[in-house]
Image (cartoon, rainbow, N blue to C red):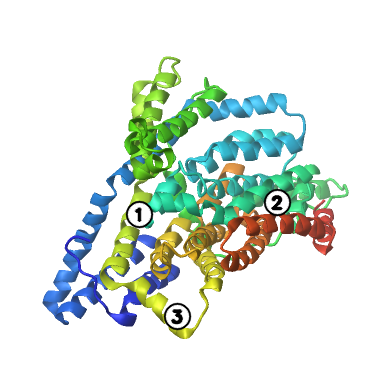
Amino acid sequence: MEGFDLIVCGAWSIVPPLLALGLALITKEVYSSLTVGVFSGMIIYQFTLNGAGGEQLISSFTMVPQMMAEQIAGNGALLLFLALLGALTVVIASSGGSRAYAEWVSTHIKNAKMASILTAILGIIIFVDDYFNCLTVGAVMRPVTDKFHISHEKLAWIIDSTAAPVCIIAPVSSWAVAVGGYMGDGGFNTFVASIPYNFYALLTIFFVFFMLITGDDWGSMRAAEDAAVHNKVPAEDAVLEEELEEEAAREQARLLAEGADAPAPESYDPGLPSIVTERSDIDAAAAHTMEEYKGINISDKGKVFDLVLPIVVLIIFSILGMLYVGGFFEGVDFATAVGENPVMGLDIGVCVALVFALALFLPRKLMSINTYVDAVSEGVRSMVGAIMILVLAWSLGGTCRYLLGTGEFVSTFLNNLGIGLDFLPAVIFVVSAFIGFAMGTSWGTVALILPIVIGVFDAADPLFLVAIGATLAGAVYGDHISPISDTTILSSAGAKCNHLRHVATQIPYATFVMVVCLIGYIVAGFTKNPWISLVLGMVLIVVGVLVLRRSGLGKKGQKEADAAR
């Protein structure tokens, strides 16, 4: 990088990422942890080159904004795409197209299975951003699923399982450019190449549709489903649950006063296990997340095509933009053109989609020009947090890669220990999962882990893509089961499900897929081939579900449901 020289500082090179990781786990706050990591790296860099002293400490401090400015300047197109994509998601949400989809489903679907499947399909259609996904799918599909007595726990699981797992494998999404940005030059192409190795995302989607088609629920999810079928009222939160219990107690007291036999008070409690966590953590995360989407006015005149067409235009013109920027129309071959400057192609696509949405919505009075501008502004604002994480993560990665040589040190250290790298993707998957669970953020987890992974594996190493996929998969799984994850909280809110019950019913399903993925990464570490692991994973899921459905877990779920009636 311009103005920076690579130095050799031995074990000190691993301190910045480890310090950032440790602080993040302790504080559950990503921004300050990444900042401290960057600053510590600059201190190590200056002290190694020029010795310890006050002047070197001041120089270290001034190098932090210098590194951040370098990263922003080199990734301006990516930041622009994130901002404009945030704008597009809020504009689409305001059109009322998703509401029209729910109305269509409610009039054409006649059973619970199809209602569940179409809920998952809507989650896949809205792949551009996971927050947008959670908010939209929950709000529009809950009345439909309630009609067919689908539990709020299952709806929350469907929402959560078709949000981040879908976004993380969609090339035209906020996740794609974010992860690509973490990996530097050619990062977007690397991200696309790593998609087949993201076993957790791919197998979760397969698992969701397999479960919805077969209806073979087990464990606590089966208990929740049986309770919903028997018209148990799901409490939306602890306050409502207490109100229901108090109302039942008052009714019991009234009957006793009248001399009648009073039934035992009932509340919605299908024997589901709870997750122990700090309630303040959940409340704080929920308040922060929901605040970003307050004040969005949604039209009641939207049609289904108002939801679908802008996304279709985004995809088509993003591809055309990549081809145009890459010189395809001037004779360059397709593959070379697409890989030349893909992020600029995405910028072109999202700009065209915003103009198309304006032309589609304004003449039909779905929104005014002022409402459109407000939606664009709100969408850009909603991406500020993601942009901050990106810039800090790029800075930490740049410090480790271009100044301290962290990756080279870790790779040499492992080779000297005689540890085979074939098992490393499986280890990376587990570590990323733990960090994602503890921090409640997959973006923050990827920002902390990828700089180390990229340094350990050469881009030409067959294990490189396996390790990248394992990092992303582990981060999504950890985020998926974390009670303090933004997307988990939004899924609960969208489904009107008690948050801790959502976590409790989702953990067994997500962990089942995680175990299958762990086996897949062990196999992929030796075969260097994603397809063998994916086929094996699908077979294991089918067999595992059939076994669990007929095992004690399935029976236990039935007993829990009976106890709740």
Q: On residue 390, which mark appears? A: 1
Give the labeled residue for mark 3. Answer: 415
Which circle's residue, 2 or 3, is located before the other in the chain? 2
Gap between marks 1 and 2, in whole Å? 46 Å
Can you say whether 249 is above or below 93 in the image? below
Amino acid tagged 1: Leu
Taking the spot 44% from the left edge, 32% from the top edge, the residue there is 314
Residue 62 x/y as whole percent: 16, 65
Horizontal arrangement in the rendering, residue 541 relative to residue 33 (left or right):
right
First of labels 1, 2 by sequence position: 2
Whole-number angstrom distance, CA of label 2 to CA of label 3: 61 Å
- Identify the secondary structure beneath mark 3: helix
Q: Earlier in the sequence, mark 3 or mark 1?
A: 1
Percent x, y of residue 443: 44, 56
Find the residue positioned furthest to the top: 363
User: Do the CB atoms of the residues marked 2 and 3 lie less than 8 Å apart?
Assistant: no
Q: Secondary structure at mark 2?
A: helix
Crowding near the residue tagged with mark 1, few <14, some 14–19, many ≥20 C-alpha atoms within 10 Å? many
Q: Residue at x 29, y 61 (%)?
A: 395
On screen, residue 29 above or below 411: above
Report the residue that reaches farthest toward the bottom. Answer: 417
* Number of marks in the rendered image: 3
Q: Residue at x 56, y 50 (%)?
A: 165
Asked whether 269 or 114 is in front, the reply is 114
| Percent of width and height locating residue 439 | 47, 63
Q: Is residue 82 visible?
A: no
